[in-house]
Image (cartoon, grey):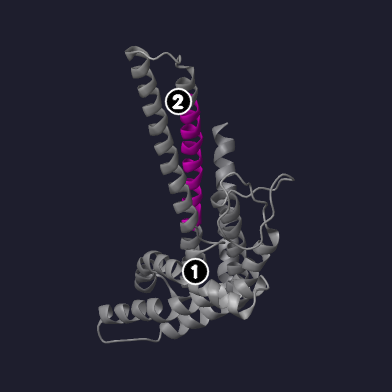
Amino acid sequence: MNATISNATVATRRSISRVWQSYLTQLAARPLRTKMVTSGTMFFIGDAIAQFGIEGRRVSSDAVPQEGYGPVDDDIVLAYNPIRAVRQAVYGALVLAPLGHNWLVRLDKVKFANKWGTLGAKVGLDQLVWGPFIVTAFWTWTGMMEGKSTQQVADLVHFAFPGAYSKCVAVFGPTQIVNFLWVPLHHRLMVHQTVGLGWNIFLSYMTNKNNTLLAIAETKLAEAQVAEAAVEPIHDKAHDDERALAHAMVEDAAKVLAAVKEERQRLRHLDGGGATAVGTRM
């Protein structure tokens, strides 16, 4: 039994090693094309994580279709949007990968006598020049692909930019420090996208954890409401005290539920990859 598991592990490692070596070969021979394929694939995966894990979309006949992005009622289950996923993949392959590849090549030419001066200049240029540009490009692309008018696209960019850019700085500022210090140039775009994908996975986990807390809070509130309704309508001190206690429990349960729902909305606002924020720079 142990020998079988060991052989399977070795075979898996060899397969992964072959895939990685094939990727490195393609990256060396055709760097831009390889990055375009990789970027498109990772954007597609990132959007799937965002739609299913963060936004709670489902492939179901009962799910409600919704084009684009935006808040919806908590009780509505949205349908998975494959067109959006394809748009994300196309953006990653045809827009982000070529632009990101060329930007990182040019940024690598920034050199100062001092190592830390070079690092500071690269990170500063990346966050102050590339960051605002690519966030704007992402939301402009999104609006155009959704068929919005010029004014609607401008409004979308204006609305989305502050939150998306601030989150990109928070996540990719530290990422770029690591990138520029230790990661070879030809792997830096992939590091970007791996971080963005990891952010989506983290938020998906947090969202599912929040969903569990939400179900518990809803159950507690329902139990408290049943207990309050069960108090006999007799007006004496004992029943009045019991009624007051039951009502206080309902109020406490309602507050907990409201807090969990607020956290759910916060997580949805933070989502990355396929929807907003970090996905703009994956």
Question: Considering the numbered disc 2 on the image, is that residue within a helix, a strand or a loop?
Answer: helix
Residue at 51% of width from left, 69% of height from top?
280
Residue at 63% of width from left, 47% of height from top?
77
251, above or below 168, in the image? above
**Within-10-Å neighbours for mark 2: few <14, some 14–19, many 20+:** many
Indicate the quadrant containing the N terminus: top left, top right, bottom left or bottom right: top right
> In terms of depth relative to the viewer, which is nearer, 72 or 124?
72
Nearer to us: label 1 or label 2: 2
Amino acid on which disc 2 is placed: Ala
On the image, the x and y values in percent for residue 195 come to: 46, 62
Residue at 50% of width from left, 52% of height from top?
201
Q: Is residue 74 visible?
A: yes
Disc 1/disc 2 C-alpha distance (Å): 40 Å
Q: Which mark is residue 252?
A: none
55, above or below 68, in the image? above
On the image, the x and y values in percent for residue 176 come to: 38, 71
Q: Is residue 221 magenta?
A: yes
> In terms of depth relative to the viewer, which is nearer, 239 or 76?
239
Q: To which residue does mark 1 refer?
A: 160
Q: Is residue 117 magenta?
A: no
The disc, 1 or 2, on the residue closer to the chain's N-terminal end is: 1
On the image, the x and y values in percent for residue 48 come to: 61, 56
Residue 244, located in which quarter of the rendered image? top left
Q: How many marks?
A: 2
Residue at 66% of width from left, 72% of height from top?
145
Q: Which residues are magenta?
A: 198-223
Question: Considering the numbered disc 1 on the image, is that residue within a helix, a strand or a loop?
Answer: helix
Q: To which residue does mark 2 refer?
A: 224
257, above or below 40, in the image? above
> In terms of depth relative to the viewer, which is nearer, 235 or 190?
235
Amino acid on which disc 1 is placed: Ala
Q: Is residue 138 visible?
A: no
